[in-house]
Image (tube, grey):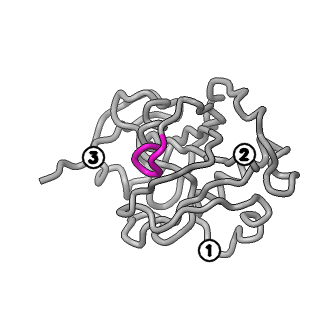
Amino acid sequence: MSTEELLEIVDRHGNTIDIAPRSVIHGNPSLIHKVVHALVFNESGELLLQKRSANKDVAPGKWDTSVGGHAAPAESLLIAAQREMQEEIGIITDKISPLYSYILSNSYETELVYSYVCIHNGPFSFNREEIDEIRFWNIPEIKKVIGQKILSDNFEFEINRCLSFHTHIASSPAGGPMPDIFKGTPFPQAR
């Protein structure tokens, strides 16, 4: 018998208020919980996306952020991002940098998202219980399908945020080489 995942309920600044089971937090958008995302680009500037399993409770069958998952109670955000990268796409790396944080709320949940970025060309070994498929997309290809119900709503928000923060990605043909992406700074305050 598996135990239910426990998550921290946090305020808008990430300060822990309480700990509750995932089933209590999901479905109640008044409870904020911490999530980590990792945007995995290849050296050509293409972004790895995952097609979520049809069995997922959020955005089943939609293309989504390279890696995403909950931070466990008391787990550092960096460790959570690295753990999720290993669990979901089978890579271990310390070449990961913080991008930004933001709050994303919908009728189902409210997440305090901490986004990271890394460059990795593979190979990848993905978790087939959570992911149906993974592949690299170039930025124009992603932009072309925004609003067509192919991408998760959360990812559409994420990619628009990423492109507004990193205009060189938005303006280059494939996304472009991104050697400066590792000039990460601590997360700006979520808004």
Is 47 or 101 nearer to us in this picture? 47
Indicate the position of residue 56 as horizontal and vertical percent values: 39, 65
- Which residue is under mark 1? 149
The residue at 81%/48% (across/down) is: 176
Q: Residues within 10 Å of mark 3 (few under 14, many from 20)?
A: few
C-alpha gap between disc 3 and disc 1: 29 Å
Residue to which mark 3 is pinned: 5
Q: Which residues are the magenta region? A: 85-91
Image-quadrant location for residue 46: bottom right
| Whether residue 77 is situated above or below residue 48 in the rendered picture | above
Q: Earlier in the sequence, mark 2 or mark 1?
A: 2
SS majority, magenta? helix
Side of 98 relative to 128 (left or right): right
In this view, the residue farthest toward the front is: 123
Tell me the SS state at disc 2: loop
Q: In this view, does 44 lie above or below 72?
A: below
Quadrant where the C terminus sits is top right
Q: In this view, does 74 lie above or below 90?
A: above
Q: Label 2: which residue? A: 43
Q: Which amino acid does label 2 sit on?
A: Glu
Task: Look at discs 3 and 2 and give the one toward the viewer.
Answer: 2
Which residue type does callout 1 highlight? Lys
Left/right placement of residue 181 relative to residue 15 reads right
Tell whether label 1 touches label 2 (CB within 8 Å): no
**Residue 190 is drawn in which quadrant?**
top right
Q: Which residue is drawn at 17% across and 51% down?
A: 2
Among numbered discs 3 and 2, the one appearing first in the sequence: 3
Residue 149's x, y, as percent?
62, 74
Task: Measure the alpha-carbon separation of dots 3 and 2.
Answer: 35 Å
